[in-house]
Image (cartoon, grey):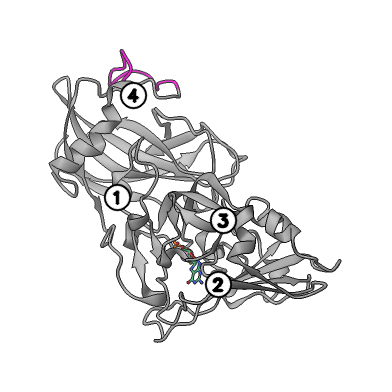
Amino acid sequence: MTRLGRRALLEGVVALVAPGVLGAGCDVDAAPAPAGPVCDRFAGGEILGLVPFTNEGGPLDTAFGAGLDGRLYTDLSKLAPERLVTPNDTHYIRTRASDLLDTQGPWTIAVHGRVRAPATLDLGALAPLVVPDLGPFVMECSGNARGASFGLMSAALWSGAPMKDVLAKIDALPDATRVLVSGFDTYGAPPRGSSTPGASWIFRLDDLAEAFLATAMNGAPLPLDHGSPVRLFVPGWYGCSSIKWVDEIVLVGDDEPATSQMKEFAQRTHQSGVPDLARDYRPATIDQAAMPVRIERWRVGGRLVHRVVGIMWGGSRTTDALTIRFAPTEPFVPVDRCYAQTTNRTWTLFTHAWTPARPGSYAIACAIADRSIPTKRLDAGYYVRTLDVAET
Ligand SMILES: Nc1nc2c(c(=O)[nH]1)N[C@H]1C(S)=C(S)[C@@H](COP(=O)(O)O)O[C@H]1N2
Ligand SMILES: [Mo]
């Protein structure tokens, strides 16, 4: 047993082989199974433990640090069909609430710029616009990396006021083509790390079609570290645009300079260079991506078999073209895909049976066998995870 103890396996992992998920008649050597939760090649088998990924970092599921240095990396190895929503206390955090944040007085959002009259939005004005169950959305930090075991990514059930409804309340001038959303981002002490203070992002009006001002997360009031009392959430975009502690909405024009936040994250959001003007930034969208999150060792019918459990996320249309390989010299093969992707809003699990030929080090990579789907980060090898197999 590594990483997860026996208890965690019983509570979480074994749920993957709960009766409803089991299908009949799939054996380990069978051809790739049809999509949908019908096939389980591990029926009747016994789980022996997990194989950890190598060269990755932590700690996981525990918040640490303060302000701009504050982080929580979510332990993705615990994902299972009925555990696809990250609880609030283990949802990833990038930047913890400032010691200077005033949570006592009434919270207001200043609305100004290219508007007929500046205004102030308070939480009372947002309340009637709030949709309680917008659904599950995955969020990923553009700086999500191996050193954090790729744990700067989580999925939650969100409640909030759709930005299109908020913007409809604002009397904008005809030359207001973009929206700057800004959040409280001043800290008592300078950050130790490389993060810089100042959190605002500029969007084209169309970019915000699905965005919302979130006021609750997983049915609970927004936690302080996640932007209480109100934060922006931009589905499908990297987290750096989902401004927390929103206190300003400014209507701007086509000549607006990029913000310090946009410049700080230009490389991580795959811009060409660091453009000076907001209009020269591409949408900070997350391309379709996929990676393993847990490698299980099983004994099935007297044979040792590995089971890869992974997630696919990002992208703007669903695909069933997910493929996997275990060494750069191998061809990509279709994953067994016991759970089909039905949405890009949140992540989707996949599973794959694997019998490594010999003990040794393996590098697991995923790819999408559909050239019409952008997969820039995935194809750059960003999400390749390595492991040492001791016994086959
Ligand atoms: N005010 C403010 N908003 C912010 C940030 C910040 O540092 N300050 N970090 C951004 C980044 S880089 C990410 S990835 C997300 C993380 O949101 P979370 O901590 O709720 O997961 O918040 C974004 N919003
Ligand atoms: Mo981020």
13 is within the stretch colored magenta: no
User: Which-is-in-front pick, marks 1 and 3?
Assistant: 3
**Label 1 sits on residue:** 386
The circle on residue 107 is 2
Label whose residue precedes the other's in the sequence (2 or 3): 2
Magenta segment boundaries in residue numbering: 21-34
Label whose residue precedes the other's in the sequence (2 or 1): 2
Give whichever of 157, 261 is nearer the camera.
Answer: 157
Give whichever of 70, 301 is nearer the camera.
Answer: 70
Q: Residues within 10 Å of mark 4 (few under 14, many from 20)?
A: some
State how far apart marks 3 and 4 are (Cα): 32 Å
Label whose residue precedes the other's in the sequence (1 or 3): 3
Q: Are marks 4 and 2 in contact (CB under 8 Å)?
A: no
Q: Position of residue 336 (x, y in %)?
A: 39, 28
Secondary structure of residue under mark 1:
strand
Residue 288 can be seen in this image:
no
The kind of residue tagged 3 is: Trp
Give whichever of 308, 203 is nearer the camera.
Answer: 203
Secondary structure of residue under mark 4:
helix
The kind of residue tagged 2 is: Trp
Q: Main secondary structure of the magenta part?
A: loop
Q: How many marks?
A: 4
**Label 4 sits on residue:** 21
The kind of residue tagged 4 is: Val
User: Which-is-in-front pick, marks 2 and 3?
Assistant: 2
Label whose residue precedes the other's in the sequence (4 or 1): 4
